[in-house]
RNA sequence: GGUCCCAUCGUCUAGUGGUUAGGACACCGGCCUUUCACGUCGGUAACAGGGGUUCAAGUCCCCUUGGGAUCACCA
């Protein structure tokens, strides 16, 4: 264990978004690579909008992706006494002050400033008020921002970024109701939890100078900041539901494998030469924040789909069989009532881009009363077909065992004997076995079905043709 | 509008002063083939524009344009 500490700090106001997932992934990867600690912290200071369902959804998403945390989840609502104490500390040192302006007054001032073309920032009305007794009037606590000077940092992704302090206004660190605000608690927590690096979305860039000023006010070491560019939709606008699914768990439900989503997400912004496919171990070894790009990237479902197809193609059939089972059940199929699911999956792996397609492709193995594809039947079920299928049955029965080789040999024999090509019998067999004209290989299907089921299906086709 | 950030094929990106500007997805063709796929071979396609610096600029600097983020008693 090194003393490197990173965290993912979502606010529980919804499901785990792919953007958040990528941020979490980058943090997790770096923590693993540097043998540091990955902390999960739930930013639930907005009591109104935070829900337990969201917390559960986020945890579920993290778990599904395999992003395990070493500490936490911590909840900010558990630390309210600490935040109170810290506010008092700043107040006592004169680094913060009480502001009695009402929200309405402030709103009015902002509007007026805007109309006059000025900056809508706090005018400092209460900044230099003489200390007064608590007379029961409601107040917020504001941080006393330096009037001049520059605040800068070297962002691990974006490089040097600097802000003039006079652009910053005195931010509220404690609300009228006594609860602390985000920019304050995030700093307290990151100090308290000894974070050495903060990787987060670049929508936080503008918050960073205020936060740095707070670190300085507390005399605390400032972590390294790394601001990850945003994920965009196909129209280059911020990715949202209207571009398609944005929830991590929705991708599971659409038949995506977690390793495909992880691989896709990590490549959105990060790269390692010309490499595209990375196992988790390779990512832990190769990931580096320096190779994360500075510009936003468009979420591209096509590429994710390709990656998913790759992982299905190369995946362990036993695991895939387990994963596809719930989708099969959704389709009213009980795999126990038919051929062993593992060999079935093997015949489908290179034909499915999602687990949904895998499930769809597997259904026929477990149904026996299906209708034959109309066009296919019209073309391939001919008056000669029954005799051919009967000959096939006879030869299959004579086989000591059904294997790819022995079944193939049988078809060769029939073709030679009848003077036909494989095309003269294959399509009919395919149709008889699967009901369709697009299916796994016919030899594969016969082997997977076994002699009894194969005979049954061929016999049904014969009966159908003979009417 | 202020502030901050960004800019290589349609998309994800490689590129750290000298390259026929590379790879991947998608797309289009050939091959393979019992269907569908897979695989394989090949092709179309990019340095936003303008100024500098330099023997040499996609790479460095400036401007323009375009995009994005943020300006809450939300996080």
Image (tube, coloured by chain):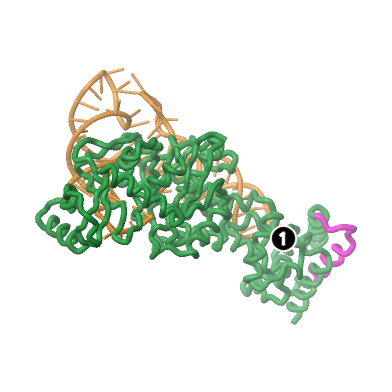
Chain colours: A green, B orange
Is residue A393 magenta-colored?
Answer: yes
Outermost residue on the left side: it is A116
Q: Where is residue A58 in the image (x, y as percent from the top left)?
A: 50, 58
Question: Which of the chains bears the disc numbered 1?
Answer: A
Q: Position of residue A156 (x, y in %)?
A: 39, 36
Q: Position of residue A425 (x, y in %)?
A: 74, 64
Outermost residue on the bottom side: it is A467
Name the foreground residue: A453 vs A301.
A301
Name the foreground residue: A29 vs A310.
A29
Binning the other alpha carbons within 10 Å of mark 1 as few (below 14), some (14 to 19) or many (20 upward) gives many
- The residue at the point 40 percent across, 37 percent down is A224
- Displayed quadrant of residue B64: top left
A421 on left or right of A267 = right
- Displayed quadrant of residue A397: bottom right
Q: In this view of the protein, can residue A26 be seen by the observer?
A: yes
Q: In which quarter of the image is the C terminus of chain A?
A: bottom right
Q: Position of residue A364 (x, y in %)?
A: 69, 69
Name the foreground residue: A259 vs A373.
A259
Describe the element under mark 1 as helix, strand or loop: helix
Is residue A320 magenta-colored?
Answer: no
Q: In this view of the protein, can residue A203 be seen by the observer?
A: no
């Amino acid at each position: 264990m090194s003393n490197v500490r990173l965290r993912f700090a979502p606010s529980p106001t919804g499901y785990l978004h792919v953007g958040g997932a990528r941020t979490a992934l980058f943090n997790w990867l770096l923590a693993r690579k540097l043998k540091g600690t990955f902390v999960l912290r739930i930013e639930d200071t907005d009591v109104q909008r935070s829900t337990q369902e969201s917390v559960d959804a986020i945890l579920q998403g993290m778990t599904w992706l395999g992003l395990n945390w070493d500490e936490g989840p911590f909840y900010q609502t558990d630390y309210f006494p600490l935040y109170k104490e810290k506010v008092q500390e700043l107040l006592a040192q004169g680094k913060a002050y009480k502001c009695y302006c009402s929200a309405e007054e402030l709103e009015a001032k902002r509007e007026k400033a805007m109309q006059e073309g000025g900056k809508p920032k706090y005018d400092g009305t209460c900044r230099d008020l003489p200390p007064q007794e608590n007379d029961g009037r409601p107040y917020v606590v504001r941080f006393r921002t330096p009037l001049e000077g520059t605040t800068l940092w070297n962002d691990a992704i974006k490089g040097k970024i600097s802000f003039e302090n006079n652009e910053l206004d005195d931010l509220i660190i404690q609300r009228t109701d006594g609860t602390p605000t985000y920019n304050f608690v995030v700093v307290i927590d990151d100090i308290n939890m000894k974070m050495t690096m903060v990787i987060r979305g670049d929508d936080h860039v503008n918050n960073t100078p205020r936060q740095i000023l707070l670190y300085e006010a507390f005399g605390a070491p400032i972590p390294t900041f790394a601001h990850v560019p945003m994920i965009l939709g196909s129209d280059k606008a911020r990715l949202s539901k209207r571009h398609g699914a944005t929830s991590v768990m929705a991708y599971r439900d659409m038949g995506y494998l977690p390793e495909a989503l992880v691989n896709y997400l990590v490549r959105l912004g990060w790269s390692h030469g010309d490499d595209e496919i990375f196992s988790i171990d390779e990512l832990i070894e190769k990931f580096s924040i320096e190779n994360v790009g500075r510009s936003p990237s468009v979420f591209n479902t096509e590429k994710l789909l390709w990656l998913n197809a790759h992982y299905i193609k190369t995946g362990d059939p036993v695991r895939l069989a387990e994963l596809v089972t719930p989708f099969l059940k959704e389709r009213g199929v009980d795999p126990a009532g038919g051929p062993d699911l593992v060999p079935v999956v093997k015949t489908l792996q290179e034909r499915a881009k999602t687990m949904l397609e895998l499930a769809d492709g597997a259904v026929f193995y477990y149904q026996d009363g299906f209708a034959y594809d109309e066009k296919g039947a019209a073309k391939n079920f001919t008056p000669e077909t029954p005799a051919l299928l009967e000959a096939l049955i006879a030869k299959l029965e004579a086989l000591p065992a059904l294997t790819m080789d022995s079944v193939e040999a049988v078809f060769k024999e029939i073709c030679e004997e009848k003077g036909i090509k494989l095309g003269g019998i294959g399509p009919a067999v395919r149709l008889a076995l699967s009901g369709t004209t697009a299916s796994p290989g016919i030899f594969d299907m016969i082997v997977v079905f076994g002699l009894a089921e194969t005979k049954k299906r061929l016999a049904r086709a014969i009966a159908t043709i003979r009417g």
